[in-house]
Structure formats: structure tokens, C-alpha cells
Image (cartoon, rainbow, N blue to C red):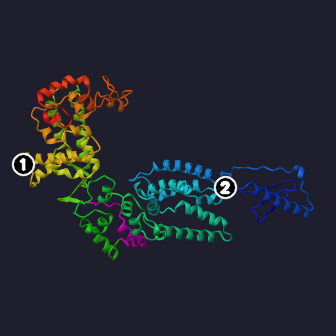
């Protein structure tokens, strides 16, 4: 059949045949739709009469649609495309999470291949982008699309999740997806040569991306290194990896970063006393002076934060000098013409040394070994019966001796919170980190730690300070035992299953069993009061006779604040 196409200024699209004619109109309000359709039908009727055709009212029908799905696009009543954005972002996020499992930080595909697979997520989101491009004007829709892209950007760059979205997109070289939508919309709307339209659209979005990057409050260290996005993204050589990304983002094996996220107690450099920031490690620390000097000689000028990336992108030689594939030093040792193998870890005299000097493998080793001993010894010490408390303490010393072996050597591992927590989980008699520091200071003959008795007194004082500083836990035990020194030096002290319940408040008290879901209420068995440790030990009438006998023996009234001191 002959094809007829007519359009007017009011967004009319008319597709007609000799026998049938269909009109598509869109409006946000009913009266607007009615006005536009009637106006258009009048013009169509006039045009048809000029062509010696006639419009049959008897065969004309109208259908008002509040939403539909057409060619994979969900069109809602308000033309906001909210349902479409939610659908494609959900699908893209599922794809991104599946692909992310294939890209570990170390190993796997290089950044170029990761970037290629990231286009799978982009193509899912960007399908028919010119149709729903207006949806990017809503912040909620922008956030949904960028969250999908962020997953892939983190995997392309092998970056930590703490890196900001702005910074990781720049490092990975991925244009923000909202600008990609805008780019496709510009190309679709532009008349003329396609290649020219694509080039102009790319220049526009890159300019907008650069302006937003310069005004962003996030990724300041990355922006100092990569000031010009275009030069970085369009470089012809060099790929990023796990180590380079750490240097570019400042999120990695830097003491300042590890302290900020709670993994270390201090932010001092391993090799000097200065704060270990990315700038310090890359451009200031004396430990890496040799590498920096070689790098400066290779490129013929001094490397700074302002010119490092600029020179690295200029030539492949500059990239290789500034962005080595492996930042760890490679050693070649020879003895009498024989090459000595260099390992990442080495066990010597019972201590596992690692290439970073953090002793992380050693801490894991002794914790696993101590855990085996704890599991074996715990079978010999039931809650009720079994050895007395003093013999149990002797057996606990076996575990303590495993954990404290050569402690002065690897005491620096306590700077990392995860290793400190790992050790505390295996020994709760005395805080293990204080015992390790005590042995280290005795080994170094620090004043106040010249002999074992004085060293233990100093350790007890530090333990007392930590005990008083903990205000959010063990409140009941702290009230009963305010002074650790008095408790530890009690000559006739012996604990058992029942005394420990009274001291900790964890046991056969209704308030405790109710809190852990083992009782229906927290009311005392013998009265209507709440059965707390304080009530059961010091107030409940059921035990008044026992308390009276104890007060007669001690010669004073029993209270939570005085009962331990009186004993």
C-alpha cells in the first residue's frame, strides 16, 4: 500500500495507508489531549479532502493509554520513565554483580578486558537512551544508574569500596553513565553527518565531566594526580592494576588510610616517624629514594604529584618508569655464584617473617595453633566440676606461652586492629596486647620495665586505665571489681561456675535469660521484682538469711560497691 507520513508542530506523528490511518498523541492532562487530538483530526480531514479522500467517522476509534511497553521501553502515564529505569538498572545490577565475581583485585583479566566487559552493563542501561533521556533529570534515576556503573568501575580499577564514585570512574576511564545517555541523545537529535555529530557530542560530555571533576569535593588526591581527564582516558599505553590504583586513590596500604578505617592504631610510616600518606610514600619517604632517583634519571626530570600522570601518559617509557607493574622490590641474591631463592614468607626460629614486615602470617599461625590447644584443653574443663580455678589458670598459661613466643620481635603487628582483635579472641585472662607490649619493653630495657615485678605493675596500671575507659560494656562487673590490682592480688581468691555468674551477670538470672530469648519474662521466681544480678545477690528476700550470715562474718553490710573489697 502507499505510505503517507504527516507531522505537525504539536508533536503529531501520523502514519497512514490508503485504507487505514493511525494517529499517536501524548499529553500530560486530559483536556490537553482532547484539544490536540481534535485539532489534529480537523487538519487531517482538511488534508484528506484536498487529496479527494474521505475520513469515515463510523470507523474511527480512540484508545487512551496510561502506560505501555513498546520495543523494550516501558512508557508510564507521566512520561517519567521511572518504571523503565528501575527495570533496566535492576537487570544491569544483576549482570554487574555476576561479572564482578570474575574480577579479583589480584590476578584475573587486565583492566582493558575488564573495561570491555563493563560495556555489557552499559549496553543494558543505554538501550534506546534517546527515548528516555529526560529521566536523567531526576536525581533518583541518576543514582540508580550510577550505582550499577560503580560496581563495574571498582572491578575495572581493582579499587577498594571506600573510593568515591567520582574518583573510581576517572581512574577506570569510564564516562559517567548520565553523560553517556546525554551523548547518545545529542547524536540522535543532531542532523547532519553522523561522525561529526558523534565527535561533537563526545567533546561536549568530556567538557562537562572535566568541569564536574574540577568542582568535586571528593577524590582530591586523585584529582591532584589526574587533573586532565581527557589525557588520562585517551592514553595509548599503560593499564592500571591493584597497586597503581592504590597510589592514584590513596586507599590502600598507607598507614593514614588504615588508621582512618580503624585497621591501625597509629598512622606512622614503617620506615620513619612521619605520617604515612600517599604523598609521603610516593614522593618523600627515604625508603624509596633509590627508586625515585632511577625514575627521575629515566625521564630526565624530577617527578612530582603535579606532573607524574602527565609524563606517564606522554610516552610508554614514562609510564613504565612511573607505574611499574609491581611496586614490590624484586631482589636477586647470589652466594658463590648460586642464586638464593627469595620468598614472600620465611619461618625462622619459630617466627614467620613476611616481605612487608607486618608479621600478619605469624599472627594467623599462632592464633590457629592456640585455637587447637584451646579446643583440646576446653574438653578437660567443664563449667561444673573438673579442675579448680588455679589449675585451669595453669592450663591457660599453655595457650599464653604459644601466643607470646618471641613477642618482642613481632609486637609491631598490634598496630593493625584485625591482628589485635585476633589475639584478644584467644586469651582473655590479661589483655594480650598489654602482655606483648610488656615483653617488648622489658626486652628493650625501657625505664619502668627493668624487672618482671615492676613491668607487671606497669601493665596492671595500663589495664586499669583501659578498664575505667570502657564505659559501654561490663558495667556490672566494673561495679563489683573497680580495682583490678586488688582483685588480682587477692591471695585466697578462687572462682567457679556460680561465682562467675554473680560477677558477670550472665547466668541463671531471669533478666539475662529473658534478654537472650530463653525466658518469657524477667520477673524473679520468689518476688515480683526484676530478677537482675543486683536483685538476686543483694536484695531478694529469698536469700536474706545467707546475706545476714555473710555480713556477720565480714563485719559490714554487703553492697555491690564493697563486697569484693571486703573479701
Q: Is residue 319 magenta?
A: yes
Name the residue carrying label 1: 451
Q: Can residue 235 be seen in this view?
A: no
The residue lying toward the viewer, choosing from 483 and 410, is 483
Q: Quadrant of the C terminus?
A: top left
- Please give the range of residues in magenta: 305-330
Q: What element carries label 1?
A: loop
Q: How many labels does the image show?
A: 2
Q: Where is residue 284 in the image (x, y as percent from the top left)?
A: 28, 69
Name the residue carrying label 2: 79
The residue lying toward the viewer, choosing from 324 and 159, is 159
Q: Is residue 123 magenta?
A: no
Q: In which quarter of the image is residue 32?
A: bottom right
Q: How crowded is mark 2: few (under 14 residues within 10 Å), some or many (20 or more)?
A: some
Q: Position of residue 278 (x, y in %)?
A: 32, 64
What residue sits 48% from the left and 56% below the top? Answer: 150
Amino acid at each position: 500500500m502507499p505510505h503517507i507520513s504527516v507531522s505537525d508542530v504539536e508533536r503529531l506523528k501520523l502514519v497512514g495507508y490508503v485504507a487505514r490511518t493511525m494517529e499517536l498523541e501524548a499529553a500530560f492532562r486530559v483536556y490537553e489531549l482532547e484539544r490536540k487530538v481534535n485539532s489534529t483530526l480537523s487538519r487531517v480531514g482538511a488534508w484528506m479532502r484536498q487529496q479527494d479522500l474521505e475520513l469515515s467517522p463510523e470507523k474511527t476509534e480512540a484508545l487512551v493509554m496510561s502506560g505501555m511497553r513498546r520495543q523494550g521501553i516501558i512508557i508510564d502515564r507521566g512520561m517519567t520513565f521511572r518504571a523503565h529505569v528501575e527495570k533496566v538498572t535492576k537487570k544491569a545490577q544483576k549482570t554487574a554483580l555476576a561479572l564482578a565475581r570474575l574480577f579479583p583485585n589480584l590476578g584475573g583479566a587486565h583492566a582493558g578486558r575488564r573495561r570491555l566487559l563493563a560495556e555489557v552493563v552499559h549496553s543494558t542501561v543505554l538501550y534506546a537512551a534517546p527515548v528516555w533521556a529526560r529521566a536523567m533529570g531526576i536525581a533518583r534515576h541518576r543514582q540508580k544508574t550510577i550505582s550499577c556503573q560503580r560496581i563495574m568501575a571498582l572491578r575495572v580499577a581493582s579499587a577498594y569500596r571506600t573510593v568515591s564514585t567520582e574518583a573510581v570512574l576517572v581512574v577506570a576511564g569510564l564516562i559517567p553513565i548520565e553523560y553517556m545517555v546525554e551523548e547518545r541523545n545529542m547524536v540522535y537529535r543532531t542532523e547532519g553527518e553522523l561522525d561529526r555529530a558523534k565527535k561533537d557530542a563526545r567533546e561536549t560530555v568530556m567538557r562537562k565531566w572535566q568541569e564536574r571533576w574540577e568542582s568535586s569535593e571528593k577524590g582530591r588526591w586523585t584529582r591532584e594526580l589526574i587533573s586532565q581527564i581527557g589525557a588520562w582516558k585517551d592514553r595509548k599505553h599503560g593499564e592500571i592494576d591493584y597497586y597503581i590504583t592504590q597510589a592514584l586513590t590513596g586507599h590502600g596500604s598507607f598507614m593514614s588510610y588504615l588508621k582512618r578505617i580503624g585497621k591501625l592504631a597509629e598512622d606512622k610510616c614503617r620506615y620513619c616517624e612521619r605520617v604515612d600518606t600517599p604523598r609521603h610514600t610516593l614522593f618523600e619517604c627515604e625508603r624509596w629514594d633509590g627508586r625515585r632517583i632511577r625514575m627521575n634519571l629515566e625521564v630526565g626530570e624530577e617527578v612530582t604529584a603535579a606532573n607524574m600522570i602527565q609524563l606517564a601518559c606522554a610516552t610508554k617509557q614514562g609510564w613504565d618508569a612511573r607505574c611499574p607493574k609491581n611496586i614490590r622490590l624484586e631482589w636477586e641474591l647470589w652466594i658463590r655464584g648460586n642464586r638464593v631463592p627469595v620468598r614472600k614468607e620465611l619461618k625462622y626460629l619459630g617466627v614467620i617473617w613476611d616481605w612487608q614486615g607486618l608479621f600478619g602470617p605469624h599472627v594467623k599461625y599462632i592464633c590457629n595453633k592456640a585455637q587447637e590447644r584451646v579446643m583440646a584443653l576446653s574438653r578437660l574443663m567443664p563449667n561444673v566440676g573438673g579442675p579448680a580455678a588455679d589449675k585451669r589458670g595453669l592450663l591457660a598459661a599453655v595457650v599464653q606461652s604459644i601466643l607470646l613466643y618471641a613477642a618482642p620481635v613481632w609486637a609491631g603487628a598490634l598496630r593493625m586492629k584485625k591482628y589485635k582483635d585476633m589475639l584478644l579472641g584467644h586469651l582473655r585472662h590479661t589483655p594480650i596486647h598489654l602482655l606483648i607490649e610488656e615483653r617488648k619493653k622489658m626486652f628493650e630495657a625501657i625505664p619502668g620495665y627493668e624487672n618482671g615485678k615492676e613491668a607487671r605493675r606497669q601493665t596492671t596500671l595500663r589495664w586499669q586505665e583501659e578498664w575505667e575507659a570502657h564505659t559501654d560494656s561490663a558495667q556490672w562487673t566494673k561495679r563489683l571489681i573497680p580495682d583490678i590490682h586488688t582483685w588480682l592480688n587477692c591471695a585466697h581468691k578462687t572462682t567457679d561456675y556460680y561465682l562467675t555468674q554473680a560477677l558477670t551477670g550472665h547466668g541463671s538470672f531471669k533478666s539475662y535469660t529473658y534478654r537472650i530469648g530463653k525466658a518469657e519474662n524477667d520477673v524473679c521466681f520468689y518476688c515480683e521484682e526484676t530478677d537482675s544480678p543486683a536483685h538476686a545477690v543483694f536484695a531478694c528476700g529469698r536469700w536474706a538469711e545467707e546475706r545476714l550470715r555473710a555480713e556477720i562474718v565480714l563485719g559490714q553490710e554487703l553492697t555491690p560497691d564493697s563486697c569484693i573489697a571486703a573479701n
